[in-house]
Each structure stands twice: as structure tokens, then as C-alpha cells.
Image (cartoon, coloured by chain):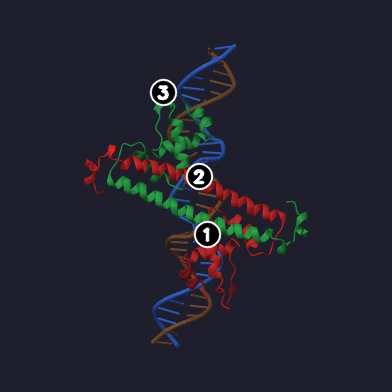
Chain colours: A green, B red, C brown, D blue
Amino acid sequence: MRIGELATKTGVSVRALRYYEEQGLLSAARSSGGQRHYLDDAVDRVYLIQMLYAAGLSSRTILDLLPCVDAKVNTPQSRAMLRAERDRIDRQITQLRQARKRLDEVIALSESPTNGCTRTDTDAVVA
Amino acid sequence: MRIGELATKTGVSVRALRYYEEQGLLSAARSSGGQRHYLDDAVDRVYLIQMLYAAGLSSRTILDLLPCVDAKVNTPQSRAMLRAERDRIDRQITQLRQARKRLDEVIALSESPTNGCTRTDTDAVVA
DNA sequence: CATGTCCCTCACGTGAACGTCAGGTTTTAC
DNA sequence: GTAAAACCTGACGTTCACGTGAGGGACATG
């Protein structure tokens, strides 16, 4: 498939797909005219990349991890890297939970009847 | 206390503290000479700001939420905003868990004896 | 063979949260 | 009272993951 189809299938922009290739995260065959052609499994690869981006990994880190995911590389260093990233994600989850807890407290407070100003003058403000 | 002390106490840079003020997140009294002076509770405020940044909130969103946290504002809109941000954090946690699970699978695979190349030629590479 | 749609490569723009340097003032310490 | 340390206000630089044209080929369809 060509880049436009991959873009619509995955929901990421054409620009983003070119950027992934530029970063070495995604490869494509080229037609005689220079156009990119992707295999079907590129869809899953893009999903994976997006997932790792969403987890806060940088392009560089993803580039380092992908060979491990592809099970082509398996060294003590690569395993340490995997564990390090997993731990980073764990810490990030912990932080998020703290923030969530804090917000929940504020929400509980704002919805408690003791603080019950259910209507204020700013209710009329639409903007 | 002055800005340098607040910076060392909280672990954030002086530049960041000035930036927080610029964004309306942190206020300070001024000395006759124009230097910022903070109350002791500014430390907690900075921690809170950092927590919300770490949760992926933007300056603008934090600016909108802080009055709620300070319990000065409590409107239907503000409560909706609080819930929306909490839900966003929940979704982010879910994504992180997925990524973590995926990494765990890769880790398990790389550490399984069936894949047991505990030493490879790249072991020697120090780089 | 023409045309509309898709694709290509530069290459500059963007927004967020600061880093960093310049040039000058204020406060502290001796 | 003077020198060092800390602080001030601009204002430009940085990084990341793209957005957004500009200008020009590639490809299916009539």
C-alpha cells in the first residue's frame, strides 16, 4: 500500500509517517518513481510506535528498543534498556496516580454539599 | 524567601519559577528593589504545579484548575473541567499500562531461555 | 494525452517549557 | 564601602513531533 492508505488506516498523518521513516522507525520499499510502498504489517508497526510515543518515549529511545521488540537483538545492554524504560513507565504511572488522587480530592471537595455553591454569578458566562 | 532559595528547596530552576509567574501560576511579593519574595507555602504550590505538569497538563489548563484547587471557584464549568482532566489522566494511565504490558512481553521473551543468547558478539561493544 | 489525485523532496513554522546569555541593579558579607 | 553573590528584565536559542506550504514528478482514468 502507499503512504496515503497507511495514513488513513492508522489515523496518523502522512507527514508523521515520513517523519517516522526519517527517524529510522519505519521502512518502506520504493517504486521506480520513488513512491513509498508498505507491507500490511506496517499498520501494526505504526500502532506500536504510537503506543510508545504515548508512553512518553522519544524517537531515539524507540529506535533503540525496536530491534528488541523485533527480537533481532538480545544483549545484556538491550535487556537493561528495556527494563529501564519499563521502570520509567512505572514511575510515570505512579506520578499520574498521585495527580489523579489530588484531582479527586479537589473534585470531592467541590461537589460536597458543605461547599455547596451550585450556582454562582459566573454561571451565566458562556465564553 | 527569595527565588534562589525557593528554587533549591523545590528543585526547579530559577528560570522555571519566573516562567510560572509569567503564566500566572505563582505569585510573589516584591521588595523595594524589585526582587521576588515568596511565602513558605509557595513550596507546596510549586510541587503541585510540577505534579500537574508531570500529569501532562498544560500551563493554561493548570491556570484554569488552580482556582478550583484553591477552592475559590466552584462552578458547574469548573467541576466539569476537573472531571475532564481526571478522565484524561485515566486514559493516559490506561495507555501507559498497555505500553508497559507490551514492554513486559518483550522483556519476558528476551529473558526466556528458549531465546537464550546470553552472550552475543555485541557484548564486547562498549561504545 | 490530458487531468485530477496522489506522491515526492526541501525547508521554514509551531507550541510548550524552559535554557542561556547580555547588560545592569540589589542585597549580603566582610 | 566595596566586592561578591544573587537578582532583575529582555530576548534569542533549544528540543520534539510534527504542520504547512512551495514547487515539481508519478499514476490511474477518461
The image shows residue B51, relative to residue A58, as above or below, that is below
Say what amino acid the circle numbered 1 marks: Met
Say what amino acid the circle numbered 3 marks: Ser
Disc 1 designates what residue? B51
Q: Residue at x 46, y 66 (%)?
A: B11
Report which quarter residue D1 is drawn in: bottom left
Q: Are marks 3 and 1 in contact (CB under 8 Å)?
A: no
Mark whose residue sits in front, 2 or 3: 2
> On the picture, is D8 further left or further right than C9?
right
> On the picture, is B23 further left or further right than A125?
left
Q: Earlier in the sequence, mark 2 or mark 1?
A: 1
Same subunit, labels 2 and 1: the answer reads yes
Report which quarter residue B113 is drawn in: top left
Disc 3 designates what residue? A31
Q: Are marks 2 and 1 in contact (CB under 8 Å)?
A: no
Mark whose residue sits in front, 2 or 1: 2
Chain letter of the residue beneath label 1 in the structure image: B
Chain letter of the residue beneath label 3 in the structure image: A
Q: Residue at x 53, y 52 (%)?
A: B56
> On the picture, is A113 further left or further right than B53?
right
| Number of numbered discs overlaid on the protein picture | 3
Q: Which mark is residue B95?
A: 2
Neighbours of disc 3 within 10 Å: few (<14), some (14-19), many (20+): few
Instruction: Find residue B25 and report its horizontal and vertical position in percent.
Output: 59, 63
Instruction: Find residue A70 and report its horizontal and vertical position in percent.
Output: 35, 36
Instruction: Find the distance from the CA under tag 3 to the CA under tag 1.
Output: 49 Å
Instruction: Find the distance from the CA under tag 2 to the CA under tag 1.
Output: 19 Å
Say what amino acid the circle numbered 2 marks: Gln
Q: Residue at x 72, y 61 (%)?
A: A113
